[in-house]
Image (spheres, coloured by chain):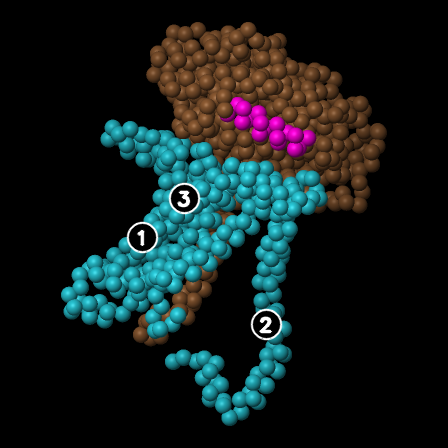
Amino acid sequence: MRYSLENIEQRALPSKGAVLKKLSKRRRRDNWIGYLFIAPWLIGFFGFTFFPIAASLILSFTDYDILSGQPNWIGLKNFETMFFKDPRYWRAVKATLYFAFTSVPLKLIFALAVAMLLMRGRRLVGIYRALYYAPSIVGGSVAVSVMWQQIFGNQGLINAMLRAVDLPTRPWLGDPRTAIWTLILLAVWQFGSPMLIFLAGLKQIPSEYYEAAEIDGADLFAKFFRITLPLLSPVIFFNLVMQLIYGFMTFTQAYVITSGKPLDTTLFYNLYVFNRAFSDFDLGYSAAMSWVLLLVIALVSALMFQLSRFWVFYEAGEK
Amino acid sequence: MSTGKLKRRRFLQMATMAGAGAFLAACGGAAPAAAPTTAPEQAAGPTTDAPAAPTAAPTGAPAEPSAAPTQEAAQAVDLRFVWWGGQLRADITTQVIHMFEEENPNVSFSYEPLGFDEYWTKMTTQAAGGGLPDVMQHGSSTLVEWAQKGFLQPLDEYVAAGSLDFSDIPETLQNHGKIDGKIYGVSAGSNANGIVIDLDAFDKAGIAAPEDTWTWSDFEALALELHEKLGIWGFGMYLHHIDLWRIIYASAGQELYSSDRKSLGYSDDKPLVDHMQMILRLQEAGAIPTLAEETEVASQGPESQFIVSGQAAMDWLAGSNQLVALWGAAGENRRFKILPIPRIAGMKQGTAIRPSQFVAVTATSKQPEEAVKFINFFTNSIEANKVLNAERGVPINTKVLEALSADAQPAQQAIYDYLARLAKDSAPYSVIPDPVGVEEIRTNIYYPEFSDPIRYGMLSPQEGAALLREKANEILAANN
């Protein structure tokens, strides 16, 4: 069944001290091999993750612009500019929040609906699962973004269909009211990975509960809200946290499809960070923006964990 | 566990697994994001290495500044040239590099064509980390910034020594690359903004092509008339292009930037307000596309402009050299002509002949003599320019231009003709080099805060122009 450390310790109870001593001695001897094995990862982590993160923290207090050479320490000025003097910054914040808080709920509802359909073990269900998962894999790619641009373009598929039935066409990507919705639609279309997680969660719910409920005369509605949703709440919570974080970090689609236009309605936070860093070369400023994003994501996640107490349900009395 | 109850531990396991999956997914997403190619102008060809691997290491022997330019003293050198541009430019430039290598067997070239955005990301990083190429391309505003920050070499001594031969280049064109009295860049070709008109559309509407001296009110009337008679847009995209800002003020006899570069050179918003109001009137009448309709096309280069598809009778030409690409996309049976940007009634011509781009030698180049020799070949060789065929703009060398004009194709002929007409009556290329901060004004103020909100009707032209002046002055004061 299950082999945990407690089991081993219990079995070795008579000579527990000796075993532990031996174990730790061996452990110490073997440690360096362990470190050797993870060395590639350690080098990668310190060289390409930890060092750049630390550097960006320092840069966020400077006016570093690559070309001028030495970064000058300017204290909190970047943050001051960001919060009080840069209207584009707030438009980026607004676009990102709007995107995250509309696309994520829609995507999760859609994912759950499809997962429940797929639960009903029809034929070919495996194929459907794979098919619905496919957009998740390719959805963030440049190729799909370019395709999306074609579909919603002035001469694109949607407008061609509208024209065919004599309906008025519109410039979907150029109109400030519709542009962000093309991106939201693209995000919702990538419902595959939360769907798979929902499927796994749904399969964990014991069928006895439903059988018992049916005997009590519960209808589909009651079964969904009284059994499925509460028992699925940890999975929903997990998906919500992960997808919101992705939502905040969306970049490729906005970069390729709309480049932040029109009127900055699709200027997502990360796109603005990128533009400031690699087309304006304000590396200090964009580093500062990145750190604010990190803090905001951490805060939002913490808040969601706090709120989760009120609606997320763990079984077996765990708290 | 076997009962399948969902516990917190299980949740954490799941989180770890999904996290790992997410990490992989993120990697998959990030890699292609680094290579976006949206605009055909920016779609660079694949990175190409020199055919013969440059193995001769010049590290031990920095080229001596010998006054005697004798061939036999030449040592094996590596040169590196990096430029931005499309596929056509990549092909012809590579061909010219091979021609140079044939003439100079001691030189082996490595080269790299890049898209515009990638180019600057890469060059800036290389400037910071060392390892800039010997020869690089520049625009007018970057040339100033890079020269002033010490990344480029002045070329005056080579001009004096004759190794960079300026004898067939008109003096005004020589001076285009001059910053603070020294030559830092050689113009790769002359260029001018313009308005391209579809002569067939004009014939069909029964309207005569306008004169070079046309005014903005002529333009407005014409755009409306073409729209009414043909049912297409009178004018295509970018009637709010940032280049027009300078041209409108040049027409009114004012400089866009003050001579100390710390502020804008004008204080009267009226010319700009008038222009934006005209745009709103034309947009309202349906004689030009709305900005929503333009947005998609604006980032895609001359090949997708509305005049190409016949949806507009006149269109914007960001540089006269773009007519080559535009005409190529439209088809050889079409007829186009370039006109100067209209002037303000009673004022002068505001369109200037300007360098389309520069070639410059970096300060870190270890073999500037050879680099200059290449630039000399690039600028003055008739054979080389027959291959380059004015794709970077009209050749600055008069003799080269004569040789090319002799057998020019229609697009090239239209460009030569336009610049020749303009040379007789054009605004002088501004003697004030672009201030630092121009790019910031363009990307973060002009379009997002000024022109776009006005065209979407979120801001009045008066408010917009005042805001633009205020913000631009702030940036200029902080950077210069």
> Badge 1: how crowded within 10 Å, few (<14), some, or many (20+)?
some
Which percent across, then down, holds residue A254? 45, 41
Which percent across, then down, holds residue A191? 35, 52
Residue A197 figure quarter: bottom left
| Residue drawn at x 76%, y 39% as measured from the top left | B366
| Residue drawn at x 15%, y 65% as measured from the top left | A217
| Residue drawn at x 53%, y 19% as measured from the top left | B272
Can residue B95 be seen from the camera position used here? no
Residue sitting nearer the eye, A117 or B435: B435
Queried whether the magenta region covers residue B94, the answer comes back as no
> Badge 2: how crowded within 10 Å, few (<14), some, or many (20+)?
few
Which percent across, then down, holds residue A270? 50, 45
- Structural distance between the alpha carbons of marks 2 and 3: 46 Å
- Structural distance between the alpha carbons of marks 1 and 2: 44 Å
Question: Mark 1 and mark 2, same subunit?
Answer: yes
Question: Mark 3 and mark 1, same subunit?
Answer: yes
> Badge 3: how crowded within 10 Å, few (<14), some, or many (20+)?
some
For the colour brown, the matching chain is B
Residue sitting nearer the eye, A77 or A153: A77
Q: Nearer the viewer, mark 2 or mark 3?
A: 3
Residue sitting nearer the eye, B412 or B101: B412
> Start and end of the magenta stretch?
B464-480
- Structural distance between the alpha carbons of marks 3 and 1: 17 Å
Pointer 3 residue: A98
Which percent across, then down, holds residue A145? 42, 42
Verify CB contact (< 8 Å) between mark 2 and mark 3: no
Q: Which mark is residue A34?
A: 2
Q: Residue furthest right?
A: B67
The colour one sees for chain A in the rendered image is cyan
